[in-house]
Image: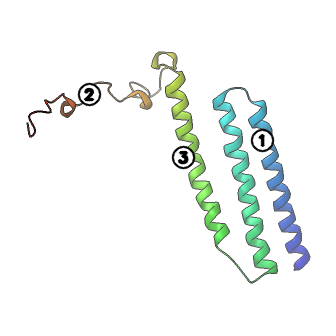
Amino acid sequence: MSILGEIIVSILLLAAGFFGLVGSYGLIKLDQPMTRLHAPTKATTLGVGSVLIASMLYFLFFAEGITFHELMISLFLFVTAPVVAHFIAKAQLHRNWKPGDLPAPGGRAKSWSVYDQADEPAADDTARDPAKPGE
């Protein structure tokens, strides 16, 4: 079983190195920020996930037994990386694009969801006289 365990751990580590290399290369070679965001979030997430799974299997095969630390880190990484990428993409959209520059949204939507909020202040945000508290 030890040779099979070594082969599995080695394959996972090689896959992790490959995904890390592809993600780094994509980060350097892609020219637009939205495409540049794609390479590290997809490829390096798989790379780090492969390293953590290889570590978990190593401890299962050759050390004291199964550990769940690596599994928890992998799950946290797989949940948070897409959320962070989504927020970065939304910030990029707000910084560089106007609603008129975007193609018309399909379906029943009247506008893109990132531009739905009104720019007008709410009724509670009206200016108050600081000399008269409680009004």
Residue 36 falls in image quadrant: top right
Instruction: Specify whether 133 is left or right of 79.
Output: left
| Residue type, numbered disc 2 | Pro
Q: Residues within 10 Å of mark 1 (few under 14, many from 20)?
A: some
| Residue type, numbered disc 1 | Ser
Q: Quadrant of the C terminus?
A: top left
Instruction: Please give the label number shown on residue 9.
Output: none
At x 69%, y 45%, the residue is 42
- Numbered marks: total: 3
- Residue behind mark 2: 121
Return the residue found at the far right. 3
Return the residue found at the far front. 131
Residue 37 falls in image quadrant: top right
Proximity of marks 2 and 3: CB atoms separated by less than 8 Å: no
Q: Is residue 37 above or below residue 15?
A: above
Say which label, 1 or 2, has the lower sequence index.
Answer: 1
Image spot of residue 19 (x, y percent): 79, 49
Marks 1 and 3, how far apart at CA: 20 Å
User: Which structural element holds mark 1?
Assistant: helix
Residue 34 falls in image quadrant: top right
Say which label, 1 or 3, has the lower sequence index.
Answer: 1
Instruction: Specify whether 14 is left or right of 86.
Output: right
Nearer to me, 27 or 3: 27
Q: Residues within 10 Å of mark 2 (few under 14, many from 20)?
A: few
Instruction: Please give the label number shown on residue 24.
Output: 1
Image spot of residue 132 (x, y percent): 8, 34
